[in-house]
């Protein structure tokens, strides 16, 4: 089975790299289907617009901010992970029902190499910065991988809600405790949007006494090396940006719709880095 018409929806969606990723695979595999599109969908008219896209023949939609929660709510059937996160980033529009799935958490897991999971996450102290939508997927994923997760967020109540929603036995970290916990962590991931805008610096951590074996991950992929990763690199730490996660979550959606396994080839990574 392949789905003829697919797209990413968001508000706004103009800067999304998803069309470049999906169209790369569609072209590479020579699939006889329509090019993947990007479509702005207003949250206030979400359901009408989805029905209209269905009438136009769309069968698969990726969903980006701020629509993932509404997408979950209008789905007739949802996957286990989607239910847990109360969010859907992949909709499959069938003739009689909409299926909602969420591939962000598995995308994050698939972006990590085995060594990092074994040596830096499983049964290790891990620290997540931020408590927004992406933090939910990352906390869920780290917990699945056996990491002991603690969470820091500028707005502590949001961190508390996130941990409660995911039934994670942990507590938010306060500013006074943050550097100490970071210094004993094996894996630290930034899920805040801080550092995405030009000239914006992420100074949440001091990086003064982070262990040399600690792995530093930033979900931001543009810039390729955020100020957060720059500081880690200056300390000689291993780092990773969010591009691989973006590709891996797309690969999972691609597989759900077309039942074809695709991967993050060097060619695709170079293409995206050049955009
Ligand atoms: P979100 O739901 O809007 O959450 C934003 C988070 O950033 C919140 O925790 C917020 O804290 C924090 N934050 C924002 N400005 C801050 C500041 N000045 N100081 C401290 N904290 C600040 O966003 P999201 O959807 O989680 O996305 C977050 C980032 O991840 C974005 O850059 C996005 O592009 C990236 N992302 C990447 C991937 C990927 O595949 N690589 C996937 C999803 C997202 P408060 O709660 O206190 O406001």
Image (spheres, rainbow, N blue to C red):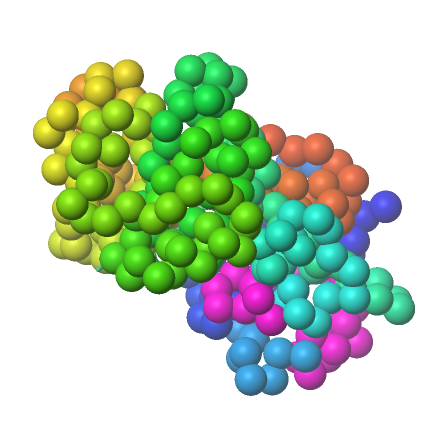
Is 14 left, or right, of 173 in this rendering?
right
Query: Which residue is at a point 29% across and 46% down the rendered structure image?
Result: 173
Residue 249 appears in which quarter of the rendering? top right
Q: Nearer the viewer, residue 69 or 91?
A: 69
Q: Residue furthest right?
A: 96
In the displayed structure, would residue 175 be above or below residue 217? Answer: below
Query: Which residue is at a point 79% across and 76% down the rendered structure image?
Result: 55
Q: What segment carries the magenta color?
A: 48-70
Task: Give the quarter the ligand 1 occupies.
Answer: bottom left
Instruction: Please give the count of numbered marks on the rendered protein.
Output: 0
Query: Which residue is at a point 72% across and 41% down the rendered structure image?
Result: 255
Is 164 left, or right, of 93 in this rendering?
left
Q: Nearer the viewer, residue 178 or 11?
A: 178
**Residue 202 shows in the view:** no
In the displayed structure, would residue 201 be above or below residue 41? Answer: above
x%, y% of residue 48?
69, 83
**Residue 149 shows in the view:** yes
Query: Which residue is at a point 29% across and 22% down the rendered structure image?
Result: 214
x%, y% of residue 181?
25, 33
Indicate yes or no whether the magenta region holds residue 147. no
Indicate yes or no whether the magenta region holds residue 63. yes
x%, y% of residue 93?
78, 63
In the displayed structure, would residue 184 be above or below residue 11? Answer: above
Is 259 left, or right, of 157 in this rendering?
right
x%, y% of residue 258?
77, 45
């Amino acid at each position: 089975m392949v789905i003829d018409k697919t797209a990413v929806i968001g508000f706004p969606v103009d800067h999304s790299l998803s069309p470049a990723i999906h169209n790369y695979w569609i072209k590479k595999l020579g699939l006889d289907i329509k090019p993947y599109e990007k479509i702005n969908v207003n949250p206030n008219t979400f359901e009408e617009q989805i029905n209209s896209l269905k009438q136009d023949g769309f069968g698969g939609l990726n969903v980006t901010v701020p629509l993932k929660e509404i997408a979950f709510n209008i789905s007739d059937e949802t996957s286990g992970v989607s239910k847990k996160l109360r969010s859907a980033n992949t909709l499959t529009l069938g003739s009689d029902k909409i299926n909602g799935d969420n591939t962000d958490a598995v995308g994050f897991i698939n972006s990590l190499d085995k060594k990092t999971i074994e040596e830096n996450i499983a049964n290790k102290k891990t620290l997540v910065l931020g408590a927004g939508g992406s933090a939910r997927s990352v906390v869920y994923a780290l917990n699945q991988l056996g990491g002991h997760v603690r969470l820091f967020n500028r707005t502590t109540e949001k961190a508390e809600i996130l941990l409660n929603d995911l039934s994670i036995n942990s507590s938010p970290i306060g500013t006074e405790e943050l550097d100490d916990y970071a210094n004993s962590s094996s894996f630290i991931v930034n899920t805040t949007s801080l550092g995405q805008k030009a000239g914006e610096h992420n100074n949440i951590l001091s990086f003064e006494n982070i262990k040399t074996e600690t792995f530093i991950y930033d979900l931001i992929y543009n810039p390729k090396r955020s100020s957060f990763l720059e500081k880690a690199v200056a300390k000689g730490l291993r780092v990773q940006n969010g591009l691989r996660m973006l590709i891996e979550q797309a690969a999972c959606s691609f597989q759900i719709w077309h039942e074809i396994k695709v991967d993050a080839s060097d060619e695709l990574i170079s293409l995206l880095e050049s955009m």
